[in-house]
């Protein structure tokens, strides 16, 4: 399982980098790609919801999303076919229309029900999956999307659900029995409740998605790809001279993330430790760096 965060999907060049990494791994092993929304998208979606709830103008937030999505589709390299590009543009247009329809309703009610908010905020992840799947297929690779609402099973709140690991294991086995592409591309952040409605795993929750599907599919390893070389002794953007750590135990990684190291969502380690799956933090901008290895050696 390879998870790519928003920083790894910030622009067209990053999308290409991620496709390169996936293509290389797929030569040796089947894989599941777990994708975040492109950087900034979830915040723009939140701004849209918040503006509508407060009776403010939500159109600028929607316009920002339109601009960012269109740019990513138009500049996608290596090139998508005209047909693929048109299909993606159409799908994106439909997503944006659905957001506008929801926003009108929210503005009328001055309230956004949690199930609606969960659907709206997951739009960025859905976009990433559609674009990445098209990019991989354009290279002739056996790629397809895996519906996270169906396979990542959860319980609890619509906006902050927790994993249901036995149900995830069963759902993954059922999906696999129906056939799985060599590269299965899945949205992070979004899970499915027992009533099959989408529920989010909390802000920054795509790391947790990767851990849940890694445990549910008994993956060999769960790699979290981000924009730094691994886990440091402190946030390298805040602390000069922070030291890169080669290896950490599950307990050490859990402690670090619970006390706020943003590089890993605090709920990530639980499912991996339980299933005995190692976790590696890697840098999309520097793939040859070894990264930080978490768990058993
Ligand atoms: P992604 O978009 O890949 O999910 P995040 O921004 O959520 O990326 O997490 C990566 C960021 O975490 C890094 O850019 C870094 O600034 C921050 N960070 C905080 N604490 C640490 C730490 N101890 N080690 C590494 N990075 C850290
Ligand atoms: N896109 C979501 C967020 O920004 C989830 C994630 O990226 O992990 O919170
Ligand atoms: Mg993150």
Image: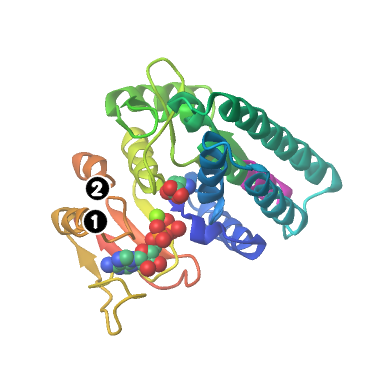
Q: Residue at x 19, y 63 (%)?
A: 248
Q: How many numbered markers are drawn?
A: 2
Q: Earlier in the sequence, mark 1 or mark 2?
A: 1
In reply to whether residue 251 is colored magenta, the answer given is: no
Q: Is residue 133 visible?
A: yes
Query: Circle 2: is it few (<14), some (14-19), or many (20+) Cα within 10 Å?
Result: many
Q: Which residues are magenta?
A: 130-139
Does the CB distance between marks 1 and 2 fall below 8 Å? yes
Q: Nearer the viewer, residue 114 or 263?
A: 114
The vertical placement of 270 against 118, above or below, is below
**What residue is shown with label 2?**
269
Please identify, in this view, whether the residue under mark 1 or under mark 2 is nearer the observer: 1
Q: Nearer the viewer, residue 121 or 201?
A: 121
- From the viewer's perspective, is 130 left or right of 291? right
Q: Nearer the viewer, residue 37 or 66?
A: 66
Residue 141, given in percent of the width and then of the height, sits at 65, 47
**What residue is shown with label 1?**
257
In reply to whether residue 135 is colored magenta, the answer given is: yes
Q: Residue at x 74, y 37 (%)?
A: 93
């Amino acid at each position: 399982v390879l998870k790519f965060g928003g920083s790894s999907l910030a622009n067209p060049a990053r999308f290409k980098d991620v496709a390169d990494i996936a293509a290389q791994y797929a030569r040796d092993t089947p894989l599941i790609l777990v994708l975040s929304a492109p950087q900034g998208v979830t915040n723009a979606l939140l701004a849209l919801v918040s503006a509508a709830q407060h009776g403010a103008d939500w159109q600028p937030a929607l316009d920002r999303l339109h601009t960012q999505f269109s740019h990513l589709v138009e500049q996608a390299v290596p090139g998508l076919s005209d047909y693929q590009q048109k299909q993606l543009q159409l799908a994106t247009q439909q997503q944006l229309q659905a957001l506008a329809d929801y926003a009108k309703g929210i503005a009328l009610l001055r309230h956004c029900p949690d199930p609606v908010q969960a659907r709206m905020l997951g739009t960025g992840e859905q976009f990433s999956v559609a674009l990445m799947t098209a990019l991989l297929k354009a290279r002739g690779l056996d790629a397809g999307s895996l519906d996270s609402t169906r396979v990542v099973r959860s319980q609890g709140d619509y906006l902050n659900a927790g994993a249901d690991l036995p149900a995830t294991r069963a759902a993954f086995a059922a999906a696999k029995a129906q056939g799985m592409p060599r590269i299965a591309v899945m949205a992070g952040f979004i899970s499915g409740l027992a009533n099959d409605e989408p529920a989010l795993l909390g802000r920054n929750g795509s790391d947790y998605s990767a851990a849940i599907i890694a445990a549910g599919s008994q993956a060999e390893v769960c790699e979290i790809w981000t924009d730094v070389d691994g886990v440091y002794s402190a946030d390298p953007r805040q602390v000069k001279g922070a030291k890169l750590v080669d290896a950490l135990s599950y307990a050490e990684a859990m402690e670090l993330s619970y006390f706020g190291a943003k590089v890993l969502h605090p709920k990530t380690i639980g499912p991996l430790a339980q299933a005995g799956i190692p976790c590696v933090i890697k840098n999309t901008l520097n793939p040859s760096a070894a990264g930080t290895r978490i768990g058993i050696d």
